[in-house]
Amino acid sequence: MARPAHQRVTRAVHRHRHLSKQGLLERAFTFAFRGLVYAQIWEDPVVDMEALAITPDCHVVTIASGGCNVLSYLTADPARITAVDLNTAHIALNRLKLAAARTLPDHATFHRFFGDADSRDNIAAYHTHVAPVLDDATRRYWEGRDLIGRRRIGGFANGIFKRGLLGSFIGAAHLVARLHGANPRRLLEAQSMEEQRAIFDNELAPVFDRGFVRWLTSQPASLFGLGIPPAQFEALAGDERMDAVLKARLEKLACGFPLKDNYFAWQAFGRGYGTASTASLPPYLQAAHHRAVVERAERVDVQHVNMTDYLAACDAGSLDRYVLLDAQDWMSDQQLNQLWAEITRTAKPGARVLFRTAGEPTILPGRVSDDILRHWRYEAEASLDYTARDRSAIYGGVHLYVLGGESA
């Protein structure tokens, strides 16, 4: 019998005794994770698609999260995508996006819904075009109410990117910055990377030197809004203070890429994608890819299930590409070995696995059995390159493993 969703999340996150400090933090995170966490996924799909080298015969299995990358992978023309997730809200968001792609009349309407996400016209479009084709569970979710009584679908009338754990975290970060005399939105006024650097150095960087900010960022619960559980907090900090780590990651986001090419920066500093003339967009929202997304949306299967459990039900040698996001940072050694045993069993020759880590190095050596890892080749040099070019800038490492040979 399948476990309820909250029990599957509990199994993934809880490592410590109930009443220990770490145990209490883990249970607080589990409670927070039951709602919407990411209205937008924070892994760069352009880097993903290059690393995955998707071909028309590929079956891609990925953790769904906010769905941006699931739909963006359709632009690479895979045969199938299976998107799995333990979060009910993420499942509902993925299914909403896919139904909207199939039913909304044109790209402008689709972009208004998920790119602007702040128009009453989106609610009318939902009821006219999208709701009639949704499954009952997804429709109940979006037409139901959140903890403060708002209809969830109403988020698309007044800024869905400001909702969820991540949206609330970014809003709180803006408030803290303003209380210390900085305005994150100022970065979006920059006309060059030199101006981006100057604004970061003069306005944003000094905030991390304030005593309150140092204290706040040292508390694991302060990063729940980033979807970071206690175990991942430890991996992210490593041997450094958390304020220094976050400052370095924000510096890359603010200064590492031109604003016109980085929609992650627009989300972090502007809480949206900006106007069509100033901001880049995820591939699935770009006009050039709209027809492909619409025509291929039926290739995606969204399942409310743990990745390991899904793989256990698949045939041996049946899958080509695996995207684990940062989920392994949450896992115990036992869970990692169970996952990689199923990946190895289900992988076709040449299969690729892509994942991210809060810290810089790959976490698999010494934790996953050598009998499993010997089947995989770690693409160390390519992984460093992907990490450097990941525009989201939040992760320490982007890692690629390929089936077929001893690890490099």
Image: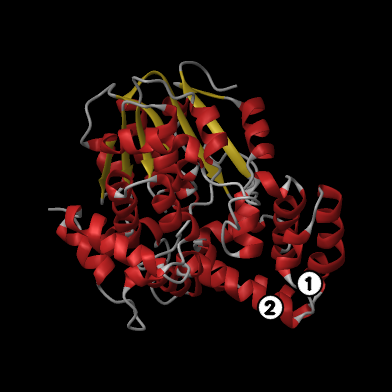
Task: Tell me which numbered mark, 2 or 1, is placed earlier along the sequence.
Answer: 2
Is 8 placed above or below 28 here?
above
Instruction: Give the camera-side residue of 205 and 350.
Output: 205
Q: Residue at x 82, y 68 (%)?
A: 203
Is 140 placed above or below 54 here?
below
Identify residue type, mark 2.
Answer: Val
x then y, percent, for residue 215: 70, 77
Residue that mark 2 sits on: 176
Q: Could one spot residue 202 in this view of the protein?
A: yes
Q: In which quarter of the image is the C terminus?
A: top right
Instruction: Give the camera-side residue of 375 and 126.
Output: 126
x then y, percent, for residue 152: 33, 71
Residue that mark 1 sits on: 207
The reply to whether callout 2 and callout 1 are in contact (CB within 8 Å) is yes
x then y, percent, for residue 367: 49, 40
- Dot 1 falls on a residue whose secondary structure is helix
**Quadrant housing residue 136:** bottom left
